[in-house]
Image (cartoon, grey):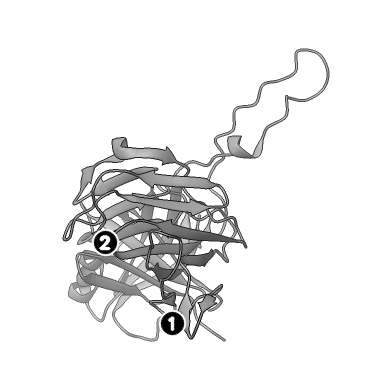
Amino acid sequence: MSKLSISLAADDRTLELGQTHDGAAGLFVNSLEGWWGTPSAKVELTERSSGDGAHAVTDDAVLYSARTVSMGVTAYGGGRGQVVDAMNGVLWFAHRIVEVTVDDGEAQTRATGYVEVEFDGDVALGMHQGTITIVCPDPRRYGTERVASIVPTGDAGGGLLYDDGAGYLLLPIQFAGDAPTGNSATLANEGTSTAYPIITVEGSFPAGVTITHSGGQLAYTAPIGLGAPLVLDSLTRTATVLGVDVTRALTRRDFPAVPAGGTVTISALAEGTGTVTATVRDTYV
């Protein structure tokens, strides 16, 4: 049977939290709350002035608060020094944004937030119990990441399609002669909540780029130069170049979104040389 595995990571440092204490020193997890369920809903109901119940709520009005994850932990050690070292191991993450990863044997998902740590006042020989709380402003949990790269063309023609992670060609592929052509890629989301891709445009495109998908178009009309990639974030609905907000240069703002358990096919149209890379992760709430 697979064991539950939990880790905290920030600034190239990772802390593995054990689940089974076999006499070893370290920090071990006793309980995990707030991970698999949804955070508190932020839905405003308007009660009917006459009649039972409240007025209907639409899908886009069902929103959630920040995710709060709570872990009961125990610091073990052969002496008080080892116990303190185990507690200091998690206290190191104070003042940092932390990525928490949970592998339950079925799926590995992660979320990002800041930590609150509290150890109780009872001091026992060789152990000390406490609670780690992680507050995640983004309530989503993210799983498998998929990366698709396409080569945009000015006439919606050629472009080799491939998956950076798996190394195989993406479908659909159109053929002209003996060479694979096309400038589209299909993005999949096997999670339970809508996924929002990040699209990165690299190269030289003097007139910008247009991303087309089933939900509309995302058009950026300012020049894109070498060494200054354009990043289109569908979650925040922003465009940035080298960290500078350039959203004002978008003339069409239909950002793509991949439904839970579904797919979205995107294509790129641009005059110039370079690539468009779309990154999407299985998303859960």
Disc 1, SS: loop
Q: Nearer the viewer, residue 215 or 27?
A: 215
> Compared with residue 151, is residue 212 higher up or lower down, i.e. above or below?
above
Residue 38 in the image, given as x and y percentages of width and height? 56, 50
Closer mark to the observer between disc 1 and disc 2: 2
Q: Nearer the viewer, residue 215 or 50?
A: 215
Q: Is residue 115 visible?
A: no
Q: Is residue 178 visible?
A: yes
Farthest residue toward the top? 49
Residue 69 in the image, given as x and y percentages of width and height? 44, 55
Q: Nearer the viewer, residue 273 or 113?
A: 273
Identity of the residue drawn at 50% across and 76% down? 170
Residue 246 in the image, given as x and y percentages of width and height? 26, 41
The residue indicated by pointer 1 is: 166
Identity of the residue drawn at 28% across and 60% down? 272
* Amino acid type of the residue tagged 1 in the rendering: Ala
Q: Is residue 142 left or right of residue 207?
A: right
Q: Quadrant of residue 100?
A: bottom left
Q: Is residue 117 left or right of residue 34?
A: left
User: What's the distance in space between the residues labelled 1 and 2, CA to CA?
Assistant: 21 Å
The residue indicated by pointer 2 is: 202
